Image: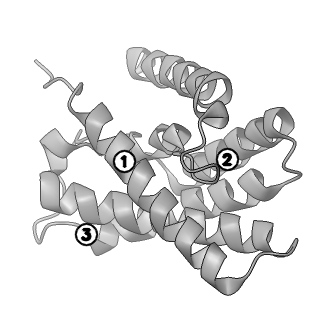
Amino acid sequence: MTSEIIQNILRWILLMAIQILVFNNIYIGGVYNPFIYVLIILSLPIEASALVTLLIGFFTGFILDVFSHTYGLHTMAFTLFGFLRPIVLRLVAPRDGYAFGSNANVLDMQLGRYSAYALLLIFSHHLLLFVLEGFSGGSVGSITMKVLVNTFLTFIVVLVSQSFTRKRA
């Protein structure tokens, strides 16, 4: 239990550093950039409580807002992400439920189930994030394109990161 908490804290530090120092400075086509920090909540154990997930979402979004100067956009979107996670996990759960001790990754969930899980959460996060950002003058078409392209880019980054997932002994 303690080693799992330490592992999740180290993952949080690593992913936030990569997001802030690298991905926040990558803009494909001048507009689109992937968000690797969504892996912080995507990779939590399936048994993680809804309250813990919600608090991690709020805290992570707040820290990202501080470094990105986005004034609550990431806080709101990632808190929604944390709120929706247990709902989406139940939605994509196998008929017999998840095995105890399963993690939310491709190895434990299988590619199809994990893809549905990740895409639903990433899309909802990006939809709220870019709709709120679009209130500053974006058109519906540009917001829609941003949501779809960023969802695709983030999902690809998430899948690539899953190739580094090891099976537990």
Q: Position of residue 53 (x, y in %)?
A: 56, 49
Q: In this view, does 93 lie to the left or right of 32?
A: left
Q: Position of residue 107 (x, y in %)?
A: 14, 40
Residue type beneath disc 1: Glu
State the image quarter where residue 139 is shown: bottom right
Q: Is 35 rendered above or below residue 94?
A: above
Precedes in sequence: disc 2 or disc 1: 1
Residue type beneath disc 3: Val
State the image quarter where residue 31 is shown: bottom right
Residue at figure coordinates x 57%, y 52% from the top left: 32
Residue at the limit of the structure toward the front, as seen here? 29
Q: Is residue 84 left or right of residue 108?
A: right
- Residue holding disc 1: 47
Secondary structure under the numbered disc 3 in the rendered image: loop
Mark 2 or mark 1: which is in front? 2
Secondary structure under the numbered disc 2 in the rendered image: helix
- Label 1 Cα neighbours within 10 Å, binned few <14 / some 14-19 / many ≥20: few
- What number is the disc on residue 55? 2
- Residue holding disc 3: 92
